[in-house]
Image: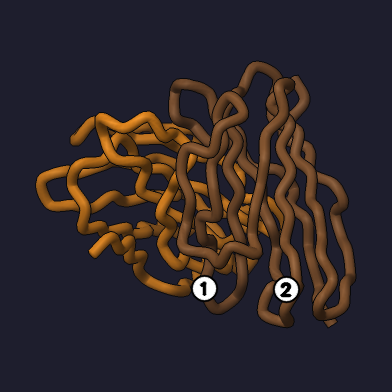
């Protein structure tokens, strides 16, 4: 059974640009969550999607957005990038049991 | 306040030692407590605990949740160098809600196992 797949794995952007990250959950999982991980703040919840609807949102500015498609794949977008957005962005999928499984992450560097 | 606190923040041991990692939390009305192991990449799922006092085991790892005292521990016996990693504890979503994906993480314990 394939795990959670995230693309791209690494990317470098400059301030002011925007970025889109993609996540394909484990087959059969309908819940997809996104997290930001930085050395200073640790793992912080961004948002959760279930059946194409945002079910929960963390305390991040509106520049961070996401969506989920009918096949449960999800994307997150960060607009007007800032240096502080440099981080590892992790996607996790879960089934009704509540166990979350993470992808390898997308490491974003903003210059 | 919804905080999850792990201790110690870092730990250095030798192969064969037994370690106990601690996780304390403040919110009581939650569905589950989860433990993850993170090496250089994504957190790897270890355990999900939902009931107080019931130990979960997987090989040399075990974990238990105490809902009365608001903490959980992760034990690793006969440690190996491959156990070196960051161990993360996370409180799951509130009970009664529809969310599964919102976890509140602790800051992690960095475990280093020397040969």
Residue A100 to residue A12: above or below: above
> Which x, y percent locates residue B55?
29, 33
Please give the name of the residue rendered at 85% of the width and 46% of the height, measured from the top-left corner. Answer: A7
Residue B13 to residue A58: above or below: below
Residue A69 found in image quarter: top right
For the N terminus of chain A, the quadrant is top right
Q: Which chain is orange?
A: B
Q: Which residue is mark 2?
A: A86
Report whether B3 appears left or right of B53.
Answer: right
Q: Which chain is brown?
A: A
Q: Which mark is residue A41?
A: 1
Report whether A84 appears left or right of B12.
Answer: right
Residue A76 to residue A84: above or below: above
Residue A103 found in image quarter: top right
Circle 2 chain: A
> Which x, y percent locates residue A5?
78, 37
Residue A34 visible within the image: yes
> Which x, y percent locates residue B110?
52, 68
Please give the name of the residue rendered at 19% of the width and 35% of the height, measured from the top-left corner. Answer: B53
Please give the name of the residue rendered at 65% of the width and 64% of the height, measured from the top-left corner. Answer: A63
Report whether A9 appears left or right of B91.
Answer: right
Q: Which is more N-terminal, label 1 or label 2? A: 1
Report whether A44 appears left or right of B96.
Answer: right
């Amino acid at each position: 059974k394939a795990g959670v797949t995230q693309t791209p794995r690494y990317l470098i952007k400059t301030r002011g640009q925007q970025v889109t990250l993609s996540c394909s959950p484990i087959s059969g999982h309908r819940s997809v969550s996104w997290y930001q991980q930085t050395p200073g703040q640790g793992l912080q919840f961004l948002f959760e999607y279930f059946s194409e609807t945002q079910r929960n949102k963390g305390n991040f500015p509106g520049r961070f957005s996401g969506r989920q498609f009918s096949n449960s794949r999800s994307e997150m977008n960060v607009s007007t990038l800032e240096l502080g957005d440099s981080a590892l962005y992790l996607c996790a999928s879960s089934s009704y049991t509540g166990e979350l499984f993470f992808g390898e992450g997308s490491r974003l560097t903003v210059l | 306040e919804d905080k999850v606190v792990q201790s110690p923040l870092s730990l250095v041991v030798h192969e064969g030692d037994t370690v106990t990692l601690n996780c304390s939390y403040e919110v009581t009305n939650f569905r589950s407590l989860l433990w993850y192991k993170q090496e250089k990449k994504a957190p790897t799922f270890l355990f999900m605990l939902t009931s107080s006092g019931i130990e979960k085991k997987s090989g040399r790892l075990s974990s238990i949740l105490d809902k009365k005292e608001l903490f959980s521990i992760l034990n690793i016996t006969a440690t190996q160098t491959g156990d070196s990693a960051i161990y993360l504890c996370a409180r799951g979503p509130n009970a009664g809600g529809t969310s599964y994906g919102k976890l509140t993480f602790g800051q992690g314990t960095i475990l280093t196992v020397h040969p």
